[in-house]
């Protein structure tokens, strides 16, 4: 065989091997249509309302209407719902009140209460005070009331955090206040 023939055979052999490898790879490679995932962001809409006003007269032995409510808005995710009462230090000298039924104290946190709320397609309202009232002690005297220099105050703040992966109230509270002191 002459040199040209050998070259032609070698070149043909190399070409055939490359063709065979190319066809084999072509048969082994495939692709699929993409799967598109759409992620939405969880949401909790929360409002705090009160219809009975902001100023109250302290009259010994009376009951005062006070109706703060936390409203978890329709479509909100299942959540841990909290409220914190911030009362001036002297308020307990004049009035008594209690959280409404269904609220439990947050372990180790003074004046903080919680409940679990499931997802709902409707607004869900929760009263914060038992009977939607506070009671002015009948032992309060005119002298005590006259001696008040700064009006006692009672404030409520609501919080919510998604329930997903938060198994305990402590975990939920920590998720709300991570990085902050939670000893309220």
Image (cartoon, rainbow, N blue to C red):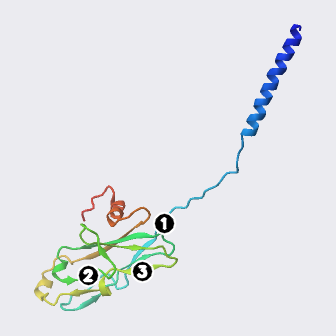
Q: In this view of the protein, which residue sits in the foreground, 112 or 4?
A: 4
Name the image quarter holding the C terminus. bottom left
Q: Which residue is mark 3?
A: 125
Q: Residue at x 80, y 29 (%)?
A: 19
Q: In this view of the protein, which residue sits in the foreground, 110 or 56?
A: 110
> Which numbered disc, 1 or 2, marks the residue that appears first in the sequence?
1
Left or right for 70, reference 65: right
Where disc 3 sits, the SS reads strand
Q: Which residue is mark 1?
A: 43
Q: Position of residue 38 (x, y in %)?
A: 60, 58
Left or right for 144, reference 44: left
Relative to 61, residue 54 above or below: above
Where disc 2 sits, the SS reads loop
Q: Position of residue 71 (x, y in %)?
A: 42, 77
Marks 2/3: CA distance?
A: 18 Å
Q: Quadrant of residue 135?
A: bottom left
Q: Which residue is mark 2?
A: 98
Q: Residue at x 34, y 85 (%)?
A: 52
């Amino acid at each position: 065989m002459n040199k040209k023939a050998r070259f032609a055979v070698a070149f043909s052999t190399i070409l055939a091997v490359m063709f065979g490898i190319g066809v084999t790879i072509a048969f082994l490679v495939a692709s699929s249509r993409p799967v598109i995932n759409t992620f939405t962001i969880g949401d909790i809409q929360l409002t705090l309302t009160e219809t009975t006003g902001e100023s109250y007269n302290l009259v010994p032995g009376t009951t005062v209407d006070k109706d703060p409510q936390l409203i978890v808005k329709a479509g909100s995710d299942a959540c841990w719902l909290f409220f914190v009462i911030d009362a001036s230090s002297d308020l307990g000298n004049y009035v008594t009140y209690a959280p409404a039924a269904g609220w439990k104290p947050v372990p180790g946190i003074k004046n903080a209460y919680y409940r679990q709320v499931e997802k709902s397609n409707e607004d869900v309202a929760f009263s914060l005070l038992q009977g939607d009232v506070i009671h002015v002690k009948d032992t309060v005297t005119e002298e005590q009331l006259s001696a008040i220099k700064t009006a006692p105050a009672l404030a409520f703040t609501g919080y919510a955090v998604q329930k997903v992966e938060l198994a305990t109230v402590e975990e939920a509270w920590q998720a709300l206040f991570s990085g902050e002191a939670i000893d309220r």
